[in-house]
Image (cartoon, helix red, strand yellow):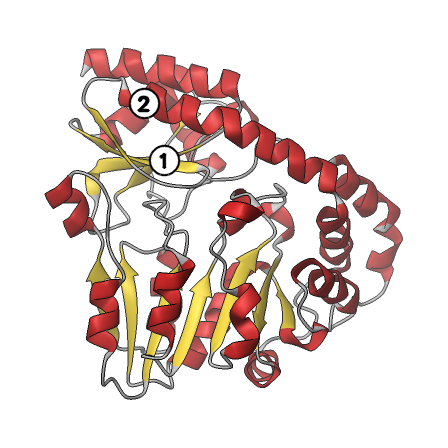
Amino acid sequence: MSLLRPHHGGNLSWAAALAGCNPQEILDFSASINPLGPPASVLAAITQHLGDIQAYPDPSAAALREQLSLHHQVPMEWVMVGNGAAELLTWACRSLSEMTQVHLLTPAFGDYGRALKAFDVKVYAHSVIASIEQQRSHGFSLQSLAAQSVGLTQAGLLLNNPHNPTGQLFAKADVLELLEGFNQVVIDEAFMDFLPSADQHSLIPEIGNFPHVVVVRSLTKFYSIPGLRLGYAIGHPDVLGQWSAWRDPWSVNALAISAGVAALQDTVFQQQTFDWLAAAVPQLREGLAKLPGLEVISGAVNFVLVRCDASVTQLQEYLLKQHKILIRDCVSFPELGDRYFRVAVRTIPENERLLAALSEALQRS
């Protein structure tokens, strides 16, 4: 493809240029966003608060922090709101740069590399792909990482749970075993919301016992508001206070604050999302597994990593030009390359459209 390949999913302008259509015509499986949203309650809140843009937003985002405090049952001073999880991960990596070494599971979300490189962090990578290739299923255990953390001094850990792009969910008990081996720990739980409460392995309920741990979350994926840029961190006030001292003022706008408050209160939308996931996740996984030349990597969340016998970049181009469907190639993950792609779980009819297009494309390859 002649156009510059994006490093993230959801670049509809790039996809539309290749497909020769308007961005609105693209069916996007490359960004793992809830296809049911944004919730009506969020849109109503934005409309109701349009007048708020005439004044500067509350720099502390107190209304949203209070709602998050209630949502997670943590003190309000342990909550920090950010311009998307990406902003908070920038400050997380600046904080981790104070360590002599930082440990990271790879392949990893691309923004980790950007932020770690910006602060010249020495990274020790631990590949989860070896287990995929050797066992034909992803069963990476954190025990090996825990063993390597013994005796480390001034060491940091940046852990993604559930892991992106594999979708693997690490058990809370296994994560807890890691914590004492590191001086600073940041856990990115951007996709944890897509698991029902009973199935989550979040560290947030334990956060008060670990002042050296910060959990980062996203509100944009579950509530389908990535254009508003909204995330949050939960951790010790001393750590979050340092992050706040580094950031620009008014990083979270007034409409995003209002949207976040409304979203967290919308229990109807939350249940609708879990009902959709219960039907759509197995439908897409089972449909992909039936297609020749594809191998589905087991995962726990609202996206699927797939190994493909054919070139994924060629497959991606065919799907765009012939069907206006965008899948997420994994070329930006050096450990994966041109034989893996990732697809978001969308509605059942949209999933069927993808499966039919993939079936046709694979028969031609």
Q: Is residue 9 above or below residue 60?
A: above
Quarter of the picture containing the N terminus is top left
Residue 332: image location, x then y, percent? 28, 48
Quadrant where the C terminus lies? top left
The residue positioned 39% from the left and 62% from the top of the image is: 173
Between 309 and 195, the one nearer to me in the picture: 195
Dividing the picture into quarters, in which one does residue 272 lie?
A: top right
**Residue at the spot 66% in from the left edge and 40% down from the top edge:** 270
- According to the image, label 1 marks what residue? 304
175, above or below 169, in the image: below
Q: Is residue 183 left or right of residue 87?
A: left
Q: Position of residue 128 (x, y in %)?
A: 22, 53
The type of residue carrying mark 1 is Val
Task: Name the residue nearer the viewer: 80 or 174.
Answer: 174
Q: Can see residue 172? A: yes
Task: Report crowding for label 2: few under 14, some 14 to 19, many 20 or more residues within 10 A (C-alpha).
Answer: many
Give percent across and percent down for residue 351. 45, 21
Q: Residue at coordinates 85% horizontally, 57% vertically from top-left? A: 52
List the residue tagged with mark 2: 288
Left or right: 123 in relation to 241: left
Write the residue at 38% across / 56% down: 171
Q: For the residue labelled by badge 2, is the local secondary structure a helix, a strand or a loop?
A: helix
Q: Are marks 1 and 2 in contact (CB under 8 Å)?
A: yes
